Image (spheres, rainbow, N blue to C red):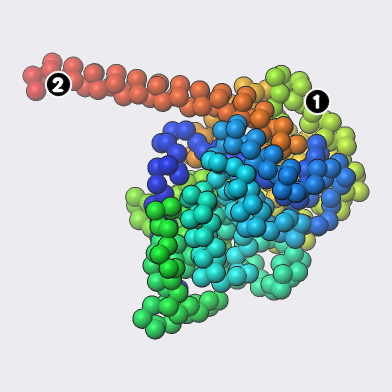
Amino acid sequence: MPTVAPAAVSANLSGTAAQPLLHWFLPTGGDGRDPGGVTAVQGRTGSATRRPADVGYLSQVARAAEQAGFHSLLTPVGLGCVDPWILTAALAQHTDRIGFLVAFRAGFASPTLLAQQADAFRRFAGGRLRLNVVTGGDPAEQRAYGDHLAHDERYARTAELMAALRALLDGKEVGGSGSDDAGAYFRLQGARLVDPAVEHPVPLYFGGASPAAEDVAAHHADVQLLWGEPPSAIKERVERLRARTRAVRGEHASLRFGLRLHVIARDTAGEAWAEADRILSRLDPEAVRASQARFAAMDSVGQARMAALHGGSADASALEIAPNLWAGIGLVREGAGTALVGSHDEVAQRLYEYRALGVDEFVLSGYPHLEEAYRVGEEVAPRLRALVDAADVHVAGAHESGARAAAGLREAAGT
């Protein structure tokens, strides 16, 4: 299938030039005070799933995030989660403004059907839709869905799907005029949407850390999602992907970046680290061992990078891998396994530093997700916005000062 450049994202979806978008996470496998497995059915503990993932509770989380000012809600997708499409369609009826970053597994449904689902959602929910394209990094879980492709083949299939999905959502026909738009994985003829709601752009979010994944991002993604790593690692990935995107799409092309992080923020740093210590003390050593064994069997490069941050060790002194960046959650949780731990001011400062490296959006979470949505939205988010605004004022002042100096030089030179 031909490469289709991602659609331009309108200003109301991409935020301002300076302020990052803040999203929250929906715990669709259950919620509690302690972390546990998310997308797989193994590794769940009673304390991690004390609050069932029913519409009643998840509606409370959604409304809390909406009231706290978050832009969208990310849903996970996998064996241990309720279906994201059905769930978010239900939650849209219990909220007014907040958007939904709906995850789906690439390759389990045709691009045409996915485009129809997305078009219906954006039409009926007033455009509150973003899509998170998940390729999958756990071969055992993929086989449970009937998918037996190898790692790089899965990403090649994802690339084909994203190209077709983007074209269809933008109102284009794929395989038109009786032609056969045949790729290696999809063969579409005359595929199109009837009267698509193109006035509501649907950004495509995508994650993956392997060379195959980064090639897909450079060609097809609007937003590349990263898991929380030390700033030096994030800086290197952002710079490499920006260069790759420009090489593929042209010198003026851009790729936005989102960072997935947990947050443990309190009034004081001592209180925050005490909570991190509490979480660590409650982790069952057998659950840690089983989780690490399962993660090691995955072929996900991103998961391997997360595991390398803590090495499977529950030694508290070794888990702060960068200032305020704690790898303890990744001992039992697949995917995003790091948290920012500290006072509200410290956490906001660390987020601001990631923003300065090129991160445009943050997908945040905390345990339990209901209470922490309020805490992060009311305490951390305003501090982050203040830091960004202060930096804008400083830059604007520097530009104005430079312009006045240049004008003075021209006047002195008589030009």
Q: Mark 2 or mark 1: name the one nearer the start of the chain.
A: 1
Q: Is residue 341 left or right of residue 235?
A: right
Q: Which residue is mark 2?
A: 410
- Position of residue 136 relative to residue 8, above or below, is below
In the displayed structure image, the side of residue 188 where residue 318 appears, left or right: right
* Closer to the eye: label 2 or 1: 1
- Give the x, y percent position of residue 166: 45, 62
Please tell me which residue lies in front, 70 or 297.
70
Q: Residue at x 29, y 18 (%)?
A: 401
The amino acid pointed to by label 2 is: Arg
Identify the amino acid type marked 1. Ala
From where the camera sits, is residue 60 visible? yes
Circle 1 residue: 274
Q: Quadrant of residue 149?
A: bottom right
Residue found 48% across the figure and 78% down from its top: 188
**Residue drawn at x 75%, y 36% as measured from the top left:** 368
Query: Closer to the camera, 224 or 174?
Result: 174
Q: Where the N terminus falls, by quadrant?
A: bottom left
Residue 144 in percent (x, y) is at 76, 69
271 above or below 316? above
Count up the numbered dots.
Answer: 2
Circle 2 — which element?
helix
Quadrant where the image shows the C terminus: top left
Determine whether the residue tagged by mark 1 lies in a helix, strand or loop. Answer: helix
> Where residue 53 appears, x then y in whole percent?
76, 48
Query: With 77 as the anchor, is 285 left or right in this view?
Result: right
